[in-house]
Amino acid sequence: MKKLFIKFCKLFGYEIIDQNKFNSPTLEKSLNEDLSIINKKSIILPLGEVKITKKVNSLLIIFRTNTEIEIWDQNRKRLFESPKIEYSIRSLNSLKKSINFLKSKYSHIKIKTIIIEDNSKRENLSKIKDLIKDDNIEIISLNRDEYKNIIKKQNNEDTLGNLSSLLKSFELGKKFGEDLIFFVEDDYLHFETMLEEMISSYERISSQIEKEIFMCPTDYPYLYMNNKKTNLLIGNKRHWRTIGETLCTFMTTKNLLNKYWENFYKTCLDRNDPFEKYINEIYEKEICISPLKSLSLHLTNINSSYGLSPFIDYKKIWDESAS
């Protein structure tokens, strides 16, 4: 009778939890394992099941890099005080590991990665090419002249380059994006599980609230420096909090990119104060969330309010991203 009941539950899409044996007979898994099925259902103990209606079948990653500028718009040294190329390489290394981890678990997701390279020296560009030679990753060298008549004249070429590469990334998102688009800068180190957790949590949360959302992979320290209220949500393997501000590393959908194209476009026309002014305006209308604990580490100066996430072993993730 027990075997027949389990077959009946499987047939009708129900799951059984045996708290005595601490397993799920229908899923044939221990309750310590990942019980969710991507594109189908998200199961979190003790909250139960969420049917997935916001399915992810493709991910476009756009990685912006400038290997020459130490910290844009600041006269400071980053944590570990290495040359900028070292951060770019380690950032890309950690991103590759996260991509491969995602592929190992969810091979059906189509992943496309584009690198926008801005003004790198030949030797630095060669290092990047060597790093991705066995990967299906496209490199585009930014032509700043393409945007000189679009972007307001800036006091220095570095600002023009930053605004130009950002606009290029948004344009590529519109052109090649399908489901999710991840805009990412080259001074973030990522945990291996970052992409898998973001996509699984996107499916659960957006299906539960019946809305497409924005996601930031980083738990920034500045989020704790005011008394703004936040809501907590349950993701795949951690909590997420609602936020009203991000930098320019975030994930969203092709639909939201198109819906708020004017905001994204205006962000790139001039050096706004704050820089992400028009992007943050979107979060007054749409939900944006960031993880607790962080999935990515923004490697800036140790005193920067936009930098190091709390409760992270910084040296460990730095060392692990070296190769």
Image (cartoon, helix red, strand yellow):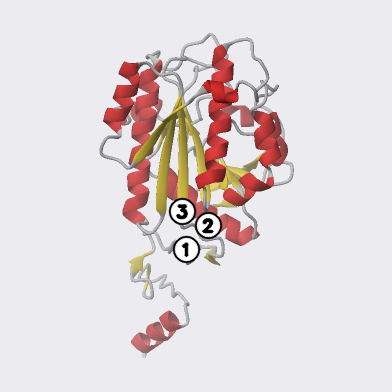
The answer to whether the residue labelled 2 contacts the one labelled 1, judged by CB atoms less than 8 Å apart, is yes
**Does any portion of residue 248 appear in the rendered image?**
no
Mark 3 or mark 1, which has the lower sequence index? Answer: 1
**Does any portion of residue 54 appear in the rendered image?**
yes
Give whichever of 2, 275 is nearer the camera.
Answer: 275
Mark 2 or mark 1, which has the lower sequence index? Answer: 1
Q: CA distance from mark 3 to mark 2?
A: 12 Å
Q: Quadrant of the N terminus?
A: bottom left
Residue 228, image quadrant: top right
Disc number for residue 203: 2
Question: Residue 191: horizontal and vertical position, in percent?
Answer: 39, 38
The vertical placement of 48 against 311, above or below, is below
Residue where numbered disc 1 is placed: 39
Residue 158, image quadrant: top right
Rate crowding at label 3 as few (under 14), some (14 to 19) or many (20 or more) other CA atoms within 10 Å. some
Residue 151, image quadrant: top right
Residue where numbered disc 3 is placed: 58
Rate crowding at label 1 as few (under 14), some (14 to 19) or many (20 or more) other CA atoms within 10 Å. many
For badge 1, the amino acid type reads Asn
Q: From the image, state whether disc 3 or disc 2 is nearer to you.
A: 3
For badge 3, the amino acid type reads Ser
The residue depicted at 47 percent of the width and 77 percent of the height is 14
Disc number for residue 147: none
Question: Residue 40: horizontal and vertical position, in percent?
Answer: 47, 67
